[in-house]
Image (tube, rainbow, N blue to C red):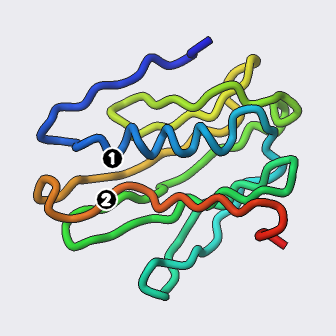
Amino acid sequence: MTMYPEETLDKYDDDGTMPANVDTLREAVVGRRIVSAERGTAATWWGGATDALIITLDDGTRVELANSYDCCANTELKNFLLHPEKIDHIITGVGTTDGYNTWHIYADMGDVLEMSVGWSCGNPFYYGYGFEITVKELEAAA
């Protein structure tokens, strides 16, 4: 069951990066439960660090959604809301609304986690955008 129909963006607004981000997040969290969600930092590919949302799942896996900035292109977590009364439910999907500006991680009882996301492709498709999503399995998370 899909609670949120897949959004379609104009070909000049997105080159498939945002749907790919949602697919990556979906693959990491569906079938699991969220233990915690918190702001933190994540390593960047160039050796620095950036702000990130770190989601810890019931099997110890950590899913890091790191903000990205590349000249005029960017993707940034603005805020998030975890619904603690629903964290005992297994995640069944990830969807978006409002042009990929609101992300929903949901279970059969509704949203478990909602994220407000700001993003821009900048000068279309010359610069990189989208979350850098890293999944750290239990062994790597320790």
> Where is residue 20 drawn, in percent x and y?
41, 42
Please name the residue shown 75% across and 37% down the image.
Answer: 83
Q: Is residue 78 left or right of residue 104?
A: left
Count every numbered label the image shows and give the total.
2
Q: Which residue is mark 2?
A: 129
Q: Which residue is more in the foreground, 85 or 71?
A: 71
- Residue type marked 2: Tyr
> Where is residue 113 drawn, in percent x and y?
66, 39
How far apart marks 1 and 2 lie (CA) works out to 7 Å
Please name the residue shown 55% across and 78% down the image.
Answer: 43
Q: Which residue is more in the foreground, 14 or 111?
A: 14
- Residue type marked 1: Thr
Q: Which residue is mark 1?
A: 17
Q: Is residue 83 left or right of residue 93?
A: right
Verify CB contact (< 8 Å) between mark 1 and mark 2.
yes
Please name the residue shown 22% across and 53% down the image.
Answer: 121
Image quarter (top left, top right, bottom left or bottom right) of the N terminus: top right
> Where is residue 132 drawn, in percent x and y?
47, 62
Which picture quadrant has residue 40? bottom right
Badge 1, how many Cα within 10 Å: few under 14, some, many 20+? Answer: some
Circle nearer the N terminus (1, 2): 1
